[in-house]
Amino acid sequence: MKRFIIALSFLCIGYANAQNTNITVDANLNLTCAFEKVILKNPDHNFETFTKDQIKRDNINKLVIESKSPNVLNIKNLSNFVDKIELEVKISNKDVVLIQAFDEERNYSESAVLTIKTGELVHEITKNIKLEEKEKDISFYSCKNINQNT
């Protein structure tokens, strides 16, 4: 399972780098997202999974996603970093929202994939990108649209 998620992550990022902006639908989503589990890769953990019963993580109470064709995608309340930085990768269609952002030194990144139909959100934080031993924090959430019954 872990290998599948990691492979999916690399696949999504590879696709995203080939096409940095692609907004095909106009959408306004107001989501509440419940934390499910996290996979950690750091000096203490080597891609170990922790459930919400094993580790304390906050839910995302109001994740806002606004997309407007052809190139506007705003994400609010995913993280302080994403709230303050210009997204490098922005993809949104009727099935998925994919984002990625880097800090100025390109040594820290955050990416997220939201599957709209299922409400599954994967939020990945990568630290120390330039080092051989990168640190990863991959959080999984279950989201519901609070404005609609979708």
Image (cartoon, rainbow, N blue to C red):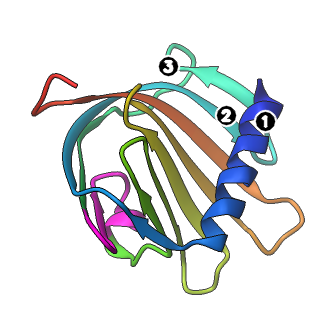
| Residue type for callout 2 | Ile
Rendering coords of residue 43 (x, y %): 81, 47
Work out whether 127 lies above or below 38: below
**Crowd tier of the residue under label 3, counting other residues whose Cα lies within 10 Å: few below 14, some 14–19, many 20 or above:** some
Disc 1 to disc 2, C-alpha distance: 6 Å
Left or right of 29? Residue 41 is: right
Instruction: Tell me which numbered mark, 3 or 1, is placed earlier along the sequence.
Output: 1
Q: The N terminus is located in which quarter?
A: top right
Q: Mark 2 points at which residue?
A: 39
| Residue type for callout 1 | Phe
Q: The C terminus is located in which quarter?
A: top left
Residue sitting nearer the eye, 14 or 32? 14
Disc 2 to disc 3, C-alpha distance: 11 Å
Residue found at the far bottom of this picture:
104
**Crowd tier of the residue under label 2, counting other residues whose Cα lies within 10 Å: few below 14, some 14–19, many 20 or above:** many
Q: Give the range drawn in magenta.
A: 68-83
Q: Is mark 2 on a helix, strand or loop?
A: strand
Q: Name the residue under label 3.
A: 52
Left or right of 106? Residue 7 is: right
**Crowd tier of the residue under label 1, counting other residues whose Cα lies within 10 Å: few below 14, some 14–19, many 20 or above:** some
Instruction: Tell me which numbered mark, 1 or 2, is placed earlier along the sequence.
Output: 2
Q: Name the residue under label 1.
A: 47
